[in-house]
Image (spheres, rainbow, N blue to C red):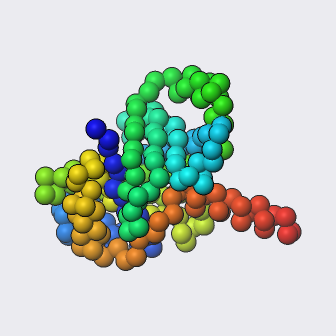
Amino acid sequence: MSTFEVEIKFRVQNPLELERRLQQQFGVGFSEPVTESDIFFQHPCRDFVQTDEVLRLRNRNLADGTSECILTYKGPNIDTRTKTRQEIEQPITEPEQWEVVLDALGFRKFAFVQKFRRRVKLTVNHRHIEIVLDTLPILPESSRTFLEVEILTTAENLDECRSLILDIANQLELGEPIQDSYLKLVLNATRNEQGNNCQR
């Protein structure tokens, strides 16, 4: 049975105020930050940027000093209000060997994204929801913090889960969502920086 990730993302200008609303509405606060480092791979026969697909190798350094690695495929977005897409995740060991395997199959590394992530997990209407506060240090200071509300579900529950995370976003007064992925934001920022360097 296919698993889908239903996600909605917002820019955050005042993280402290957001955490206050989260505590007020749901009685919870964010965890200590962990570092997530993502390597993105390009398919040898099609452009994942054009097809809106993702193949990602994530290394997560946990607060207790341990780490974990996850290989993830995400399919194209199938919604206009949220980021809803098929997701396949596989925890792995020896990520360096997986890089060798992917390279041998013709996949090439084309982007790297690092972020600091704090998370909180909720159960609403018997659904397990994750809310994460992300900071991407490569982006300008005024626009590097984001909040994501996400849930994993199956195809028959997509409408219910979309409504649920949109309702949570309204309760937290998050404003207008953005559709851009972190990968797109980082690629755009990198291109802009390269363009500015060429003009100097």
Q: Position of residue 55 (x, y in %)?
A: 52, 41
Up the image or down, 125 lies above or below 169; here it is above
Going 40% across and 37% down the picture, which residue do you hit? 89
Q: Would residue 25 appear left or right of 107 to someone viewing this image?
A: left
Closest to the observer, 99 or 94: 99
Please say if 81 is above or below 38: below
Identity of the residue drawn at 25% across and 61% down: 159
Where residue 178 sits in the image (x, y, percent)? 46, 69
Question: Residue 68 at what x, y percent from top left?
Answer: 42, 32
Q: Is residue 23 left or right of residue 105?
A: left
Task: Count numbered badges in the picture.
Answer: 0
State whether residue 61 appears in this view. no
Residue lying at 65% horizontally and 62% vertically, measured from the top left: 189
Q: Is residue 142 above or below residue 165?
A: below
Work out whether residue 171 can be spotted.
yes
Q: Quadrant of residue 43?
A: top right
Residue in the foreground of this view, choosing between 84 and 119? 84
Specify whether 24 is left or right of 59: left
Q: Residue furthest left?
A: 125
The x and y percentages for residue 51 are 56, 52
- Of 172 and 127, nearer the camera is 127
Quadrant where the N terminus sits is top left
Quadrant (top left/top right/bottom left/bottom right) for the C terminus: bottom right
Which residue does the image show at 54% across and 69% down from the upper left? 143
